[in-house]
Image (spheres, rainbow, N blue to C red):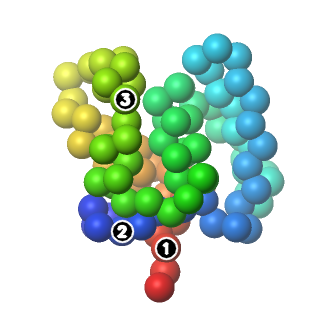
Amino acid sequence: VPDDTFLWHVPASTRLCWRNWGDEYIVYNAASGQTHYLNSFAAKVLQYFEAEPASLDALLEDVSVDDIARRADGQPLLAQVRELIKEMDALGLIAPVVS
């Protein structure tokens, strides 16, 4: 289980190619050859870690109220983001920064 203090990033070896249509995003991971469909919230999280390494706390501080409202499916935001980070890590889209 990822630690909340980890810094996450899109590794340099992971080249992401983006396309979007409104609130729908397709991201192609050139390193793995996989294409992923993302909703706007997941895309925002991935783009956040693509911009620079960051912690879960930093991400949560920067997530807008509009994004939180759109994710109102009964699960607390922190749990949702932890699960999303876990999934993105498993898919090889992000990784913890190794010091």
Q: For numbered disc 3, what is the local secondary structure?
A: loop
Residue 98 against residue 49 in the figure, above or below? below
In front: 11, or 28?
Answer: 11
Q: Is residue 59 left or right of residue 8?
A: left
Residue highlighted by disc 3: 64
Which residue does the image show at 51% across and 63% down from the upper left?
Answer: 53
Residue 83 against residue 68 in the figure, above or below? below
**Quadrant of the rendered structure where residue 47 is?**
top right
Q: Are marks 3 and 1 in contact (CB under 8 Å)?
A: no
Of callouts 2 and 3, the N-terminal one = 2
What's the distance in space between the residues labelled 2 and 3, CA to CA?
21 Å
Residue 22: image x %, image y %?
A: 64, 14
Residue highlighted by disc 2: 6
**Amino acid type, callout 3:** Ser
Pick out the residue farthest to the top. Answer: 22
Q: Is residue 11 left or right of residue 35?
A: left
Which residue does the image show at 42% across and 51% down from the upper left?
Answer: 85
Q: Is residue 35 left or right of residue 67?
A: right
Q: Tag on residue 97?
A: 1
What's the distance in space between the residues labelled 3 and 1, CA to CA?
25 Å
In front: 98, or 83?
Answer: 98
**Amino acid type, callout 2:** Phe
What's the distance in space between the residues labelled 2 and 1, CA to CA?
7 Å
Q: Are marks 2 and 1 in contact (CB under 8 Å)?
A: yes
Of callouts 2 and 1, the N-terminal one = 2
Residue 79: image x %, image y %?
A: 24, 42
Q: For numbered disc 2, what is the local secondary structure?
A: loop
Which residue does the image show at 60% across and 53% down from the upper left?
Answer: 50
Of callouts 3 and 1, the N-terminal one = 3
Q: Assess disc 2: are there few (<14), some (14-19) or many (≥20) residues with their C-alpha within 10 Å of its C-alpha.
A: some
Residue 57: image x %, image y %?
A: 29, 54
**Quadrant of the rendered structure where residue 35 is?**
top right
